[in-house]
Amino acid sequence: MSLSTQQGDDEDNNILVAKVDNARNISNILKAIHFRDTATVFASSNGLKVTVEESKCVQANAFIQAGVFQEYAIRQDSATFKVNLTVLLECLTIFGSSSAPGMNTALKMCYAGYGSPLQLLLEEGGVLTDCSIKTMEPDEMLDFGFSSANVENKVIMKSECLREAWSELDMTSDVLQILMSPDKPYFRLSTFGYAGSIHADYPKDSDMVESFQCEQTQTNRYKLSLLKPSVKALSLSCKISIRTDHRGFLSLQYMVRNEDGQVSFVEYYCCPDEDVEE
């Protein structure tokens, strides 16, 4: 019996029901923000937003649009709950991280409202398993106050060139310095580690740079330890948007295309490192 024929006895009690034919499309996105055990899930008619925060300095959001699911229904304006992300990912990959060729794990996810567990029903090759994950009271989320209206500099580029930069920069550095300027070197990433100062420059007319908008020269430093988790999203993405606002706050938006060609987004917000003198 397939998952699509499964109807829970309390189906009508659920305020959120989502079904997807390939659970990897969900687990891969969630892995991109998995640097803490817990995450807050915000469900609306647009889909799911899953948020992870660290040290009140960095916030990661995974946006899984409703269109990624084969079926998606929510019976109220929104629903918010906290869940153990580590346990959720273990359940999503319960049949293994890599299925046999042509074999996908189908997923049905249900939530009945405040205090109820998150119910998962997974099916692969005719084998069914169900998981029940305790939900918790959601924490108040940080508001970085990052507004598009206050963005001063923005670069959109192919992710592959930034992946190369990460492999060349010195990870013994405490900070990553980002320079954006209307003039040369335009866009520069710098580290200051045991190997000395290392710079990676990208001309605005490079084939790797899709868009370059720079209002004024900005040099900001960010703790590398806070940015390292975003490498997971970088490895999955095909395109990245790098934005800074007038305060030097950083937004990294990753466009991730799943196995079915659908697009989801992961975004990291990070505050500048105020302990480093320019």
Image: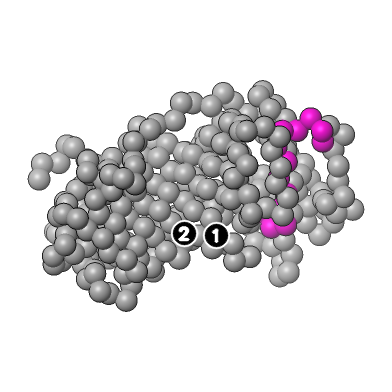
Question: Which residue: 87% across, 50% down?
Answer: 5
The label shown at residue 255 is 2
| Residue 30 image offset from top left, x and y in percent | 54, 48
Where 136 falls versus 210 (above or below)?
A: above
The stretch in magenta equals: 11-23
Residue found farthest to the left: 278
Quadrant of the rendered structure where residue 18 is? top right
Residue found farthest to the right: 1
In this view, the residue in front, 29 or 124, is 29
| Residue 8 image offset from top left, x and y in percent | 85, 38
Q: Do we see residue 167 in this rendering?
A: no
Please tell me which of labels 2 and 1 falls first in the chain: 2
Where 264 falls versus 238 (above or below)?
A: above
Q: Residue 152 in magenta?
A: no
The residue indicated by pointer 1 is 263
Question: Which residue: 33% across, 40% down?
Answer: 146
Q: Amino acid at mark 2?
A: Met
The label shown at residue 172 is none
Circles 2 and 1 in contact, beta carbons < 8 Å: yes
Q: Amino acid at mark 1?
A: Val
Question: Which residue: 27% across, 74% down?
Answer: 206
Left or right: where does residue 228 sit relative to residue 63? left
Residue found farthest to the bottom: 207
